[in-house]
Amino acid sequence: MKDITNIQTGHFAKPIGIGNVLYLQSKHFDEFGQLNSVLHPDLVADKISKRHLLKEGDVLFAAKGTKNFAAVFENHYEPAVGSTSFFVLRPTEQSILSQYWAWQRNSNTTQTLLKGQAIGTSIPSISKQILENLEITVPSIEIQMRIQQITKLRNKEKRLKQK
């Protein structure tokens, strides 16, 4: 992965309740990587490095705890930063869709592999090095788009079943 993506840690901050930047945390997402709460800006922009601001298509990977999901950042909530419980994956290759990255991270095979390499007993954590050394298959854009469509339909079905 390190050859085709930039991986950086999230931003460490203490939310202040009001501000102009969203601070995305794992608790804001469900087990499918979908936002499940109403978000309000709770950080002040002048205290945040521009390199931590999320861009459309960044993939947030929750590397700490037992809920290791990946979610694609969509520009609906900009400006925003991810907390330190996330790694921010930014593909450097145009031949990779962000949604495919997220699907790949959320697949049972990848989840099992990553959980098997997690460090720590009380709060398991997946290191940056583990992510960087992860080998993945990158199919054609057409196949990635089909996977994206199927994944959207599966997630919609799961949400409907839960309701």
Image (tube, rainbow, N blue to C red):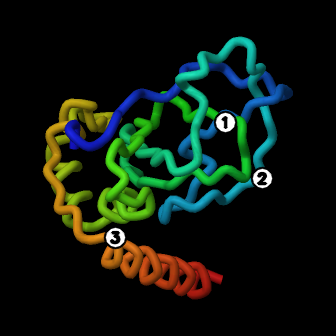
Disc nearest the viewer among 3 and 1: 3
89 left or right of 57?
Answer: left
Label 2 close to label 3 by CB (< 8 Å): no
Locate residue 55: give its quadrant.
top right
Q: Residue furthest top?
A: 47
Q: Which mark is residue 38?
A: 2
Do labels 3 and 1 touch, CB within 8 Å?
Answer: no
- Residue 99 located left or right of residue 1: right
Task: Name the residue at 58% across, 48% down.
Answer: 56
Q: CA distance from mark 2 to mark 1?
A: 14 Å
| Residue 82 higher or lower than 111, as above or below | above
Distance Cα–Cα, label 3 vs label 1: 28 Å
Q: Amino acid at mark 1?
A: Ala
The disc at residue 80 is: 1
| Residue depicted at 44% across the width and 77% down the height | 151
Q: Earlier in the sequence, mark 2 or mark 3?
A: 2
**Upstream in sequence: badge 3 or badge 1:** 1
Q: Which mark is residue 23?
A: none
